[in-house]
Every structure is written in structure tokens, then in C-alpha cells.
Image: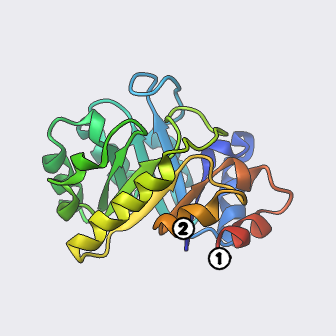
Amino acid sequence: MIVSASILSSDFSKLKEEVQAVDLAGADWVHLDIMDGHFVPNITYGASVVKSIRNHTKKIFDTHLMISNPSQYVDDFINAGSDIITIHYEADIHLHRTISYIQSKGVKAGVSLNPATPVSVLEEIINYVDLVLVMTVNPGFPAQSIVPSSYSKVAKVREMIKSTKKDIYLEVDGGVNDKTYKELISAGATALVSGNYIFQAENYKTAIDKLKTY
């Protein structure tokens, strides 16, 4: 099980140390929540912050663009050191083109779905992506509870991925903790984004190890 630690819930006054701490604690990926105050109601940070921490860990940078018109900004995040860039289905009217462009730069590309977006929209793009991210909360804020229908949605996406016969990550983001992770894994998730659960824990390693124990 891949655990992607979301630094949105970390202490930004010591971001370098927080990134290094989850690296040493066993996080597989570092999840970077990029919000613009337009696609979602919150504003977080940009490519300059991503670049500033790139040299402090060798872990995969799992960049989630919760922004409008992501195609205008993907180069910034590629140049900042992202290994995976995920864009929202709802935010890009030329999704295939943007996905293909990201991959042409040697970076893995993912597509994300908001809770109210049906899985059927994946039919024409799933064969082209490296990752599908199912938002299990409405994006924009940390520390939310999972939308109850998310479990069945993850299961539907898992079946779609199986039909491709390709190795596509199925990532879930929102409300992932010691109470919810097993059901998400049972539904088919292969990568768990967790922020508040990890960064509010007394011991990051204990929290991360828990999410890997099934």
C-alpha cells in the first residue's frame, strides 16, 4: 500500500523538517495540494514552494492541481520537480491533450474526480492515465469526513481499471485515517493520501505503518 503524506496538514513554519520527517517515517510519496481560490475556495501554495523542498527528499512528489486551467501551469510544477501531476476532470476541457503533454515531459499524469462527478466520465480517458484520484471529500479543506458514497465509487473505478489491463494507481484523498483506510483498500484503493491523520499523530511512523497494515 502506497501512503502519500499530504503536507497541507503539516507545520508550514518548519516545512523542510516536516517533509524530512515523513520521509524518514516511511511515507512513499509526498502529496502536494495546490489550490487557487477559484477551482476550490482555499489558497495553498505554488510551484516555488514545491521547488524549495524538492532537494530535501528523494520521495515521489505527488502533485494534485486543484486549480482552474491547469494546462497553463503544468510546466511550472514539472520544472519544480513533480513526479506525478494530477489534474481534475472538471477543470480542463482538453483533458487528453494536457495528460499527453505531462507524460511527454517524463512525468506521470493522473485525473481526479470530485465526489459529485460520476465515474462514467473516465471511459474516454482511463486508458491514457497513470493514476486515477477519487476525491472522497469535497476538495478545498483538510480534516473532512468521507462522503459515504465514496466507497462504492472507488469500487467502480477499480473495475474500470481492471478492464484496461494496465497498471494504473487508484488513489483516494480525504478523510483517510485508521477508521476508514481498510474499507478504502477493500474497495480497491492502491494509494492513500493522508494529511491530518499523519501530521496530528504523536508519531508519524506509527500512523504511516498503521495505514500499511491490512
Q: Are marks 1 and 2 in contact (CB under 8 Å)?
A: yes
Circle number at residue 214: 1
- Coordinates of residue 160 in the picture (x, y in percent): 27, 64
Q: Nearer the viewer, residue 202 or 49?
A: 202
- Coordinates of residue 49 in the picture (x, y in percent): 52, 43
Q: Nearer the viewer, residue 210 or 39?
A: 210
Say how many tags the image has. Answer: 2
Circle number at residue 139: none
Mark 2 sits on what residue?
185
**Element assignment for label 1:** loop
Q: Nearer the viewer, residue 59 or 137?
A: 137
Q: Is residue 112 above or below residue 126?
A: above
Residue at (49%, 48%) from the top-left corner? 150
**Element assignment for label 2:** helix
Residue at (62%, 68%) from the top-left corner? 27
Quick one: which residue is furthest to the right in this view? Answer: 202
Amino acid type assigned to the residue bearing label 2 in the image: Ile
Q: Is residue 182 above or below residue 37?
A: below
Neighbourhood count class around disc 2 (C-alpha, 10 Å): few under 14, some 14–19, many 20 upward: many
**Left or right, 96 with reference to 75:** left
**Left or right, 95 with reference to 23:** left
How far apart in space, not on screen, are marks 1 and 2 (Cα)? 8 Å
- Coordinates of residue 101 in the picture (x, y in percent): 17, 53
Amino acid type assigned to the residue bearing label 1 in the image: Tyr
Which quarter of the figure is the C terminus placed in? bottom right
Is residue 153 visible from the viewing direction of this image? yes
Neighbourhood count class around disc 1 (C-alpha, 10 Å): few under 14, some 14–19, many 20 upward: few
Is residue 62 visible from the viewing direction of this image? no
Residue at (53%, 69%) from the top-left corner? 186
Which of marks 2 and 1 precedes in the sequence?
A: 2
